[in-house]
Amino acid sequence: MMSRLVLQVRPGSVAIHRWCLPSNRPSKLPLVLFSRSFSQQRSKVPASQVPKLWAQAQAVCFDVDCTITKQDALDDLANFLGKGQQVQDLTNAAMNGDMDLAEALQKRLDIMEPTVDKLTAYVQSNPAAPRLVPGIQSLIQELQARNVDVFLISGGFRELILPVADLLKIPRDHIYANRFVYMSDDARLDGTGTTESVSQLIRVTGFDPSQVTSREGGKPEAIRQIRSKKPLQTVVMIGDGITDLEAAEETGGADLFIGYGGVVARPRVQENADWWITDYQEILDALPRFKVAMVGSGAFASAVLQMISQNARDKAIFQDIVDVYVYEEDYHGAKLTSAINQQHENPKYLPGVHFGDNVVANPDLESTVQDADLIIFCAPHQFMHSLCKQIQLIGVKPTAKAISLTKGIHISPEQGPQLMSSMIHRMLNIECSVLMGANLAGEIGPNGLCEATIGSRVREQGHVFQELFDTDYFHVSVIPDIEGAEMAGALKNVVALAAGFADGCDLGQNAKAVVLRQGLSEMRQFAKAMYPNTVRDETFFESCGVADLIATCYGGRNHRVAQEFAKQRGRTSFSQLETDLLNGQKLQGVLTSEEVQSVLSSKGWQNQYPLFSTVNAIVRGRLEPKDISRFRELPGLSLESGGEEPSLLEKTIGF
Ligand SMILES: NC(=O)C1=CN([C@@H]2O[C@H](COP(=O)(O)OP(=O)(O)OC[C@H]3O[C@@H](n4cnc5c(N)ncnc54)[C@H](O)[C@@H]3O)[C@@H](O)[C@H]2O)C=CC1
Ligand SMILES: O=C(CO)COP(=O)(O)O
């Protein structure tokens, strides 16, 4: 126990094993009186650039003492030990730049020399929450919600900072701070009969000089280290002291320095700060708020507006108003957009489900998307190419980010098969994530339990969209496998047709389970064949995989229409059934079956996908719905013969 405490000293640091022997202390840096003249060295960031740099910060580094907490922790500890005034004078000398940092640090520790039990008592009697300065917690939460990395760079001590970092949910590897060096009283520890505990016999005698923050230039060095781990274009330093200002002084340091004078206002810091504040609300208000727009207003689009409108209103990261492009149509003698704006629900596609009055339906695509920062695509996939073409002409913000909720693939005569996310990326030149999952529109709401999966190549982007969709009744997780998630979302609609045929022909639950199992297997196989380098097996165990398959095969529109098709033995066409049963909502599975089959045919893979191929033969009228039970007989089934009619796909895209 004794030796473990002493061994908290990190490798490279100097451990002292006896106290009161000055010659054994860590070697001190030269005793130069350190008085910097920053006004001569530093050219400030032009005022016009300051808000822009703040808005685009990718990492924000905070000093801790008097910046995040109301007191300097060492001063506070000194007060606790009854040595307040002596220590405070040295702290001020260092913070004002009048004394070498390492020297001031050592002098303060020399005065205090706290034992471990005193240190522990101090930490326990000073919980983190009351020590925070006003507004800091909200500011850090808002930065984290925007996926800005938050770091602590402090000349204070790690042991005193950890409770604050934990409260603010700052990971421990984002802390750059000093470490104590402990020394045991060997004589008394070795002796017999002492009544003192070990923690009373081990005390702090110095600091670990290998920590960057223990020396001059340590803060810019910490920022250089942060940058070396992850490329960051804009790093901001916030603090109250000269050493914080110094962090923006050197090459590779911070790009912007915000001086905080809410606890102590140091004239030299104030004079040289790019932005001087005394209240965090000022920079909180200046954080960017994303403008959200949605393209699409059918059943699912209307369902997700419940979560989006709530989050846009509740979270400062988003602007309140959510603009929604509505494909205009007449609704009971009026325009659907007017009905939506009056009733705050979509009375045609999802009646009875209310969203916030901060949702504004707009029949004009241009004004809906042109200023948006976050664009949600949720239109049936057959309309997506033409919508993207229109948006391409309008143009979107180059910094806009998109997410596609659309389930389907697009077959382009030039580009071949494409996921919606790649089509959006290619046509609009913006990054596009996807949200897929077991999300039957009519069941989503505050009384439900629902999950979804965001696939995102860019982690930060995925998390911003997670903030937009996630609620206590709609749980969203983020994965990097965008292709796997999107492929699963599109392909399960084909399997849902097979499940509908099985139910329509009363094949029973065992047979339906066979269809689902085979379907899931072909979904994964096809996705991996198309995207061998990125699709992961585990994606199929997420909400976007097996869960969506189950929900759709039991309660979805594709299943319902296919079941009816089978009951009528294929005598009524899918398009007629869609019109009769779905009140304007659109099926995705039939067209997707055609799209998938065109890929299978072009690659000669039909027999490797017996369920997909059998579904397509039924869709085309070359087999009967009951033949779904014979999918194992492929390649014996004659799928390509008969049916001289052009396929739906041929009709749709003019092949
Ligand atoms: N409904 C659901 O439960 C779920 C649907 N999805 C997916 O979301 C996507 C959108 O589906 P929903 O929101 O349910 O739509 P929907 O099928 O309920 O509604 C059809 C929509 O298409 C629009 N529309 C009709 N003709 C158009 C045209 N020529 N151009 C542009 N838009 C036109 C209609 O105005 C309407 O908004 C689909 O890919 C679907 O697979 C995903 C999860 C659940
Ligand atoms: O995707 C869906 C559920 O997640 C809805 O499927 P349907 O389009 O078949 O209704």
Image (spheres, rainbow, N blue to C red):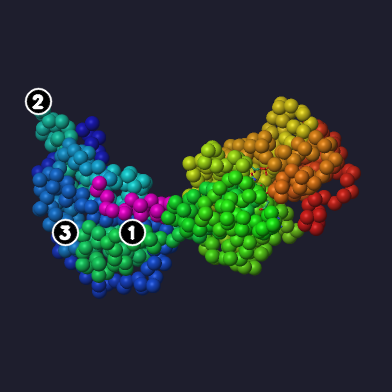
Span of residues in magenta:
130-151
Figure check: 172 above or below 410: above
Determine crowd level at label 1: few under 14, some 14-19, many 20+ residues with C-alpha closer than 10 A. some
Residue 136 is inside the magenta segment = yes
Q: Position of residue 186 (x, y in %)?
A: 13, 35
Q: Which residue is mark 3?
A: 92
Q: Who comes first in sequence, dot 2 or dot 3? A: 3
Q: Residues within 10 Å of mark 3 (few under 14, many from 20)?
A: some
Quadrant of the rendered image holding ligand 2: top right
Q: Up-down: is 144 above or below 120?
A: below
Foreground pick, 284 / 63: 284
Q: Is there any visible trace of residue 312 in the rendered image?
A: yes
State left or right for residue 421 relative to residue 615. Answer: left
Q: Amino acid at mark 2?
A: Gly
Name the residue tied to disc 2. Answer: 193
Instruction: Name the image quarter holding the C terminus.
Output: bottom right
Task: Establish if 592 lies above or below 260.
Answer: above
Q: Mark 2–mark 1 contact, CB under 8 Å?
A: no
Distance from mark 3 CB to nearest ligand 1 atom below 8 Å: no
Residue 446 at what x, y percent from top left? 52, 41
Residue at 31% across, 53% down: 136
> Left or right: where does residue 355 sit relative to residue 420?
left
